[in-house]
Image (cartoon, rainbow, N blue to C red):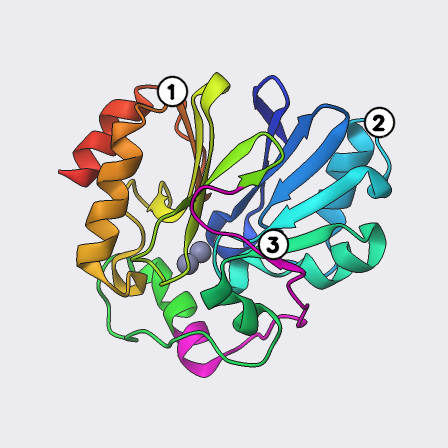
Amino acid sequence: MIELAPGVHALGHKAGGRVHAFLIDAGGELSLVDTLFEGDARLVLQAIDSLGRAPSDLKRIAITHAHRSHLGGLAELKRRTNATVHAHEWEADIIAGERRAQPVTILPKQSLKLIPFQLGLRFNRPRHTPCPVDETIDEGDALGPLQVLHAPGHSPGHLAFYWPELSFLIAGDAIATWPEVCGGWTAFNLNLAQHTVSLRRMAALEPRVVGVGHGDPIVDGAAEQVHELAA
Ligand SMILES: [Zn+2]
Ligand SMILES: [Zn+2]
């Protein structure tokens, strides 16, 4: 776990394609964006413990989008914390296990390291433990101190989150830094036109720090890099 800014903690994991989640500590309450890959939620619970906090201090969990790597710990975290689960309406029934995420091509489009994830989406394996979404969220809503941005393209209900005072952006899978810096994994971006608009909106925020779904956060020259990806 690394602290990117006061109250902003990035949780990284090798599994799930170097997947990352973000634990936000503001006003005495914890909020979590995404839940890492593993079903036991151990790393998130350890992170909460290392802040000297209890699982019950986690008040809300938001899911950027319903791809497997980001959902792993959700059901267990709900059970352990009773946090309110938030997602965009379009992703909610996938998270609840009532519909599967849209498959993508299994042909190589980028790094061969991504083929296992393309196959996983095609064959819906491994599945996540379903978890109902308590409240849907959309553009203009708030999640603790974070503003909710609807940033579709990677998936229709893909969300990003922005903390203006810290100039901190959680881009979700709209941007990745593993296996390379890119505007999301090419094979997975369902709608390129929407995705480009979302990247331009993120660039216009001129973020100082950008947390991404896969790979390390961008802490140097973040705004410039997002502008390059949006161009
Ligand atoms: Zn994704
Ligand atoms: Zn992902």
> What kind of residue is marked 1?
Arg
The stretch of residues the image draws in magenta is: 119-141
- Residue identified by numbered label 3: 86
The first of marks 3 and 1 along the sequence is: 3
Residue 130 lies, in percent from the top left, at 66, 72
- The residue shown at (58%, 81%) is 98
In this rendering, the count of numbered labels is 3
> Foreground residue, 131 or 14?
131
The first of marks 2 and 1 along the sequence is: 2
Residue 1 in magenta stretch: no
> Foreground residue, 83 or 188?
83
Check disc 1 and report its element: helix, strand or loop. Answer: loop
Q: Is mark 1 within 8 Å of ligand 2?
A: no
For label 2, the crowd category at 10 Å Cα-Cα, with few meaning under 14, some 14 to 19 and many 20 or more, is few
- The residue shown at (30%, 23%) is 206
- Tell me, yes or no, whether the two marked residues, 3 and 1, touch with CB atoms within 8 Å: no
Q: Which mark is residue 52?
A: 2
State the image quarter where residue 45 is shown.
Answer: top right
- Residue identified by numbered label 1: 208
From this view, report whether residue 157 is shown above or below residue 95. Answer: above
Q: Cα distance, mark 2 to mark 1?
A: 28 Å
Q: Main secondary structure of the magenta part?
A: loop
**Quadrant for ligand 2?**
bottom left
Q: Cα distance, mark 3 to mark 1?
A: 25 Å
> What kind of residue is marked 3?
His
The first of marks 3 and 2 along the sequence is: 2
Check disc 3 and report its element: helix, strand or loop. Answer: strand
